[in-house]
Amino acid sequence: MNAQPFLKMDDIHKSFGSLMVSNGVTLEVEQGEIHALLGENGAGKSVLMSILFGILRPNSGEITYKGQPLHLSSPREARRHRIGMVHQHFMLVPNLTVAENYVLGQGSPLRLIRDMGAVHARIRELSDRYGLDVRPDAVIEDLSVGEQQRVEILKVLFHGVDLLILDEPTAVLTPQETDRLLILMRELVRDGKTIIFISHKLDEVMRVSDRISVMRDCRVVHTTRVMDTDPRELARLMVGRDVLMELPRGRSKPGEVVLSVSNLNVQSELGLPALKNVDLTVRRGEIVGIAGVSGNGQTELALALAGLLPVESGRIELDGQDITGLSPAQINARSFAHVPEDRHKMGILLPLNLAENAILHCHDAAPFARRGMLQKRQIIEHTRSLIRRFRIKTPDETERIGNLSGGNQQKLVVARELARDPDFILVSQLTRGIDIGAIEFILQEMLRQRDAGRAILLISTELEELFAVCDRILVMCHAEILGEVPPDRSRLEEVGLMMAGKKPAVECAQEVATPVPAKSSC
Ligand SMILES: Nc1ncnc2c1ncn2[C@@H]1O[C@H](COP(=O)(O)OP(=O)(O)OP(=O)(O)O)[C@@H](O)[C@H]1O
């Protein structure tokens, strides 16, 4: 190792008003390593990386990069130093194409229009090389969350980097996509690049990293080589206690059908078939999982159930009543809770504070409103109880939710929806961005909700999450439900392969014999 590290962030302090969010952080990163940064939600990882990428300025502290002091006042300057960042929340302009996003702000529009052919060719070349499956002419808002994430990663590669910051890049990827990304990361390191990798997924961190730093309470508390540690120790360092790696759970006792979907056909916003003849039921007291590579109809399934996407044909029943074609407001008025896939688009209103977000669906009804007047005391008490119960890291309920860390925003959405005491809970990507201690708590909460008789449909690209709590797992592929698999870990690889559409025809036919009839094209 060199005497001088490639990057040194030394005694970095940063506060927002009286809230200290970086409390003397020191981080050293060597050239050509993958350095993982771990920590609980709100530990200060994104803030530290925002400082390194020139988005935030520290109150004090020094950064040395490639042997020189680094003073950044904007991301543009960071990019000039070949520092690139893929953010936790996408930074793409939704109504522009991939290529347009890549050249945005890169110089004279006329020259760019002339060079667009070369830009497209470069995007295709990088996409092919790394297997990212990104089309340069695709419009961002037409892409699934997983696809947008791949666009973000390719964007940084497109601009060229020496130091690449990946802030939870795998949060929206499937196991296969994650494997591909981890291989890509190793390839980039072989090309001489250095990577700082933020993730809550300890298995990935153990697989790909060279060294790991753990943040706690806004400072780095431990740095270790990967070979000198294990997931249990890392979890303890992060959370400050032992975390259950396997959740204890009893058998489900399914009751009557709460949600029934029959022969559902839905088109995507592009007018392509997004759901083909989907049949499923969710009973009281069970958790049904939907596994699938993102972009195979799961998003449309959730949107159609919530009334956010028109149904072409088929029927959706909730508690025995037809809710097909009802508006989102009408569905919301039923016993239907929804934790959406994209919390920023549908889960919360970023400029509003926690208390306002905590009553988004019920601000005009008792106990939060009476005779048209908001009941401030009830709203505050309710929000404070959600904050306490879900251990949401925030100064108080008056904080703007946009200022919370990603994981803490997600906790508020989950807390709010569960507090509605619904019959049916639709959850997409439940644990996205949530730290290992909070995942343990939230999954246990799902099991408690199940045991209290709720019917839960859990859509996830996280197989671990599905296997931890589901009673049945349906696998989606090409807009159809391919089959059903019990939550038996010995079937994990099989599900992964089905998700990737790699299921051999003969096995697929066997799967039809399992409880849910397959409608697969296999
Ligand atoms: N602009 C801001 N104004 C006020 N507080 C902020 C702002 N940005 C971040 N914070 C606070 O800084 C703290 C650290 O947030 P940060 O996003 O760095 O956490 P994190 O470790 O990345 O968490 P997560 O794993 O949930 O993404 C949090 O308490 C957050 O609420």
Image (cartoon, rainbow, N blue to C red):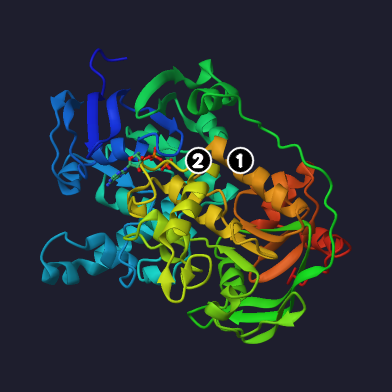
Residue 218 in the image: state x and y as whole percent: 35, 30
Tell me the kind of residue under disc 2.
Arg
Tell me the kind of residue under disc 1.
Phe
State which quadrant residue 161 falls in: top left
CB under 8 Å between callouts 1 and 2?
yes
Rendered view: 433 above or below 508: above
Residue at disc 2, secondary structure: loop
* Residue lying furthest right: 513
Rendered view: 331 above or below 376: below
Rendered view: 77 above or below 347: above
Residue found at x 54% / y 31%: 207
Residue at disc 1, secondary structure: helix
The answer to whether the residue bearing label 1 lies less than 8 angstroms from the nearest atom of ligand 1 is: no
Q: Earlier in the sequence, mark 1 or mark 2?
A: 2
Badge 1, how many Cα within 10 Å: few under 14, some, many 20+? some
Observer-nearest of 31 and 174? 174
- Can you identify the residue that label 2 sits on? 391
- Give the number of the mark in front: 1 or 2: 2
Residue 352 in the image: state x and y as whole percent: 34, 60
Spatial separation of the CA atoms under disc 1 and disc 2 = 10 Å
